[in-house]
Image (cartoon, grey):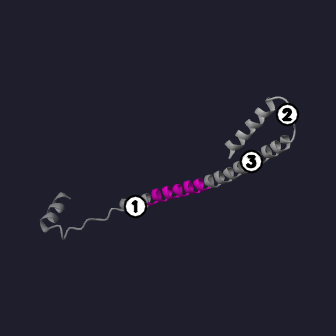
Amino acid sequence: MELKAKELLKQGFSEFEIPKNHEISTNEDLFGEVGKSKIDALKNSISEIHEMIQSRERLSRKIHEEGENLKSEIKGYLSENEKMQIASSDPTREKNDLRHKKIEIS
């Protein structure tokens, strides 16, 4: 075997044929599979992120609607009780607190 290799080296590399290594092709397939699995994982992550964004938007709309309902309830309560005569300062303080809450919600 060594003698044959030495003879081939004397002839030159142009005539020396390197046999194909079949492990390389299977490694390429292996790399393709790894790449494909990573791409699939990224696609799954992206779809999960889109779902989270949509649920955040729904939650934001719901919170905004609840805030608007709370503001309208406070406004209705204040308008009902403005007509009543108040003898003590505690209800006036409560009304002012409600007005401040309404401003905070806005």
Characterize the local packing of mark 2: few (<14), some (14-19) or many (20 or more) Cα atoms within 10 angstroms. few
User: Residue 92's mark?
Assistant: none
Height in image: 86 above or below 3? above
Residue 89's image quarter? Answer: top right
Residue identified by numbered label 1: 28
Q: Helix or strand or loop: what does disc 1 sit on?
A: helix
Depth check: give the residue in front, 89 or 36: 89
Closer mark to the observer between disc 1 and disc 2: 2
Characterize the local packing of mark 3: few (<14), some (14-19) or many (20 or more) Cα atoms within 10 angstroms. few
Q: Earlier in the sequence, mark 3 or mark 1?
A: 1
Q: Position of residue 12 (x, y in %)?
A: 14, 67
Q: Earlier in the sequence, mark 1 or mark 2?
A: 1
Residue found farthest to the bottom: 15
Residue type at the position of mark 2 = Ile
Residue identified by numbered label 2: 86
Residue found farthest to the left: 10
Query: Magenta segment, which residues?
Result: 32-50
**Residue 45 magenta-drawn?**
yes
**Residue 19 magenta-drawn?**
no
Residue type at the position of mark 1 = Glu
Height in image: 16 above or below 42? below
- Report, in whole angstroms, how far the alpha carbon at label 3 lies from the one at label 2: 30 Å
- Report, in whole angstroms, how far the alpha carbon at label 1 lies from the one at label 2: 85 Å
Q: Position of residue 37 (x, y in %)?
A: 50, 56
Q: Helix or strand or loop: what does disc 3 sit on?
A: helix
Q: Earlier in the sequence, mark 3 or mark 2?
A: 3
Depth check: give the residue in front, 93 or 14: 93
Callouts 1 and 2 close, C-beta under 8 Å: no
Q: Residue at x 17, y 67 (%)?
A: 13
Q: Residue at x 79, y 29 (%)?
A: 90
